[in-house]
Image (cartoon, rainbow, N blue to C red):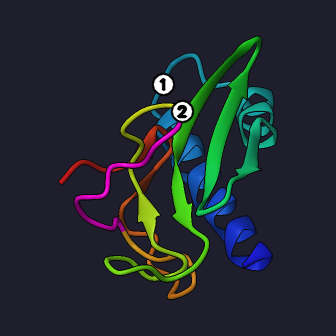
Amino acid sequence: MDMAINELFKHIGEDYKQRSLRSEYHDPKAVDEFIDSLYVDEGRKYLKIVKKLGNQEMVWGFVMKKDDKKFRAGDILKAASWAAPARNKARGNILDGDFSWVRWTGPEYL
């Protein structure tokens, strides 16, 4: 799971880099700082992916730790709140290498 999380961070960072390259304010140092701002907060059922920029923390999304009745381990879920994921549909699976729903701002909407 750790390797898959690292791959997820890589895809989030790559999306951020691609978006920032289109901006007149592109700063390579800011891209590295953004990637370094990502961390995992491990809960009982989920891995919460958090972005910490300055003194502000934002939930990027959640990853299932193990299978349950509706989702498989590794499923990416959009955040519904700081503490809970939206359990309507998975947005890819990090163990399958499905990062098509990954954006730097969070998993895409349906």
Front-most of residues 90 and 8: 90
Three-letter amino acid code at disc 1? Ser
Q: Which mark is residue 101?
A: none
Residue 108 image position (x, y, % from top left) = 31, 50
Residue sitting at 62 percent across and 49 percent down? 48
Residue 24 image position (x, y, % from top left) = 51, 18
Asked if 1 appears above or below 110 in the picture, the reply is below
Q: Quadrant of residue 4?
A: bottom right
Three-letter amino acid code at disc 2? Ser
- Circle 2/circle 1 CB separation < 8 Å: yes
Residue sitting at 61 percent across and 72 percent down? 65
Magenta run includes residue 15: no
Please tell me whether the stretch drawn in magenta is mainly helix, strand or loop: loop
Q: What is the spatial separation of the Cα atoms under label 2 and label 1, in whole angstroms?
A: 5 Å
In the structure shown, which secondary structural element does the residue marked by tag 1 occupy? loop
Disc 1: CA contacts within 10 A as few (<14), some (14-19) or many (>=20)? few
- Provide the residue span drawn in magenta: 83-91
Front-most of residues 30 and 79: 79
Magenta run includes residue 89: yes
Q: Which residue is mark 1?
A: 23
Residue 43 image position (x, y, % from top left) = 68, 54
Q: Which mark is residue 20?
A: 2
